[in-house]
Image (cartoon, helix red, strand yellow):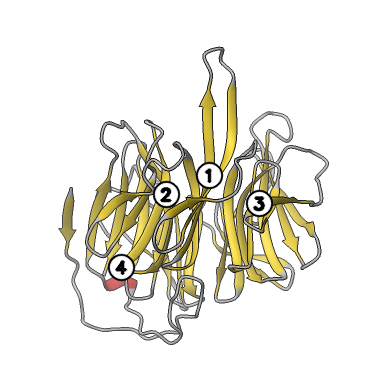
Amino acid sequence: MRYLIILFLSGIVLWWQCEKNPSGIEEGAAAKDPRKLKWTVDTLRFPGSYSTDLFDIWGSSARDVYACGLNNTGSDAVWHYDGRYWWITAKDLQGAADYYDVFGFSKDDVWVVGTVRYHFPNGERKYLTRCLHYNGKEWEHIGWDKEGSYACIWGSEPSNLWCAGADKIYRLVNGDWQEVEYEKPHHPKIYFTRMAGLAADDIYATALKLDLVEPRDSVAYYLYHYDGLKWSIIDSTVDSPYAPRPHFGNYLANIGGKLYSAKRGAFKYEHGKWIKIHSDLLISRIFGTSENNIFATGNHGTIYHFNGDDWQKLKPVNGLENCFIQGTWSDCKEVFFLAMDGKNSYIIHGQ
């Protein structure tokens, strides 16, 4: 289903710096004001599935956008937008998987990572890693499936690609993912959730540990840093009803060459310290093309935009109150929000 919401346009086009990043955004590109766009909504639903949940979105251009996730049938969970339509890609490639993160360097170099779930009649469950790569012609399965899960992926260039997941960090070496040592916290069995880097020797990752302290409703977050030699814990915080609010989030993003995070608010990392830039507890995702064009999103249809001067809450379409805004991608001219409500996923497209 597709429908159009027309907002009043003043015809004014704003200009701000769109900085070069792996998404192919050109430096100095003319940017449209996201607060004055026309919005459409596409509903993404896998046929025969009672739920289609998409978790991440990335594009090399506004005519080449990917979204990945899962559906309850356990198959075909990578979608592609060609400028006109969304369609399922990477179909039936070596079995079904749940995909959690998509990242790329160009239209001919796209990566998706996730997990294959096996459920046996005796009740036993097994989880194996899964990584797909699109080379411009076809999707290919990269590396051997390993016990565990891939949850996030990032690289400074194609020859320096990393991913992480259940209790492990990997680096791509000669076509296979090789496990890398990292500093272990006092509480083992952590789960890496997000990676973002500022340079090849300046990479960050977040990990979480559930039920760290009693009562069993707390979450510990660890911030890891790679300096070109080793992965080390440089910060940590606990999210609990009985503790102060976390001073950084587990969702990371490189925006304008600076590190940002989101979860129960939005934060910016400067001079070794986190600065809170937005206090709305519904925020759990952040994306930006520059420090003057930032989007913070989250539960109950929460969408904020920062233009370098102020934050403004956006409501591009009606009916988002029950949606979680999972992700954002933009080339400075068009904006894609990825939303889900537990049944369907939606692409809210501004142009």
Pointer 4 or 1: first along the chain: 4
Q: Which residue is mark 4?
A: 63
Judged left or right of residue 186, residue 140 is left
Question: Residue 110: x and y, percent?
Answer: 47, 61
Q: Is residue 270 left or right of residue 333?
A: right
Q: Residues within 10 Å of mark 2 (few under 14, many from 20)?
A: many
**Front-lying residue, 222 or 170:** 170
Separation (CA) of disc 2 from disc 3? 20 Å
Q: Which residue is mark 3?
A: 177
The residue at 28%/62% (across/down) is 82
On screen, residue 105 above or below 221: below
Chain-order first, disc 3 or disc 4: 4
Residue 121 percent location from the top left of the image: 52, 14
**Which amino acid lies under the numbered mark 1 shown in the image of this protein?**
Gly
Give the number of the disc on residue 68: 2
Helix, strand or loop under label 1: strand
Q: Earlier in the sequence, mark 2 or mark 3?
A: 2
Q: Residue at x 46, y 73 (%)?
A: 289
Task: Identify residue for label 1.
Answer: 114
Precedes in sequence: disc 3 or disc 1: 1
Q: Are marks 3 and 1 in contact (CB under 8 Å)?
A: no
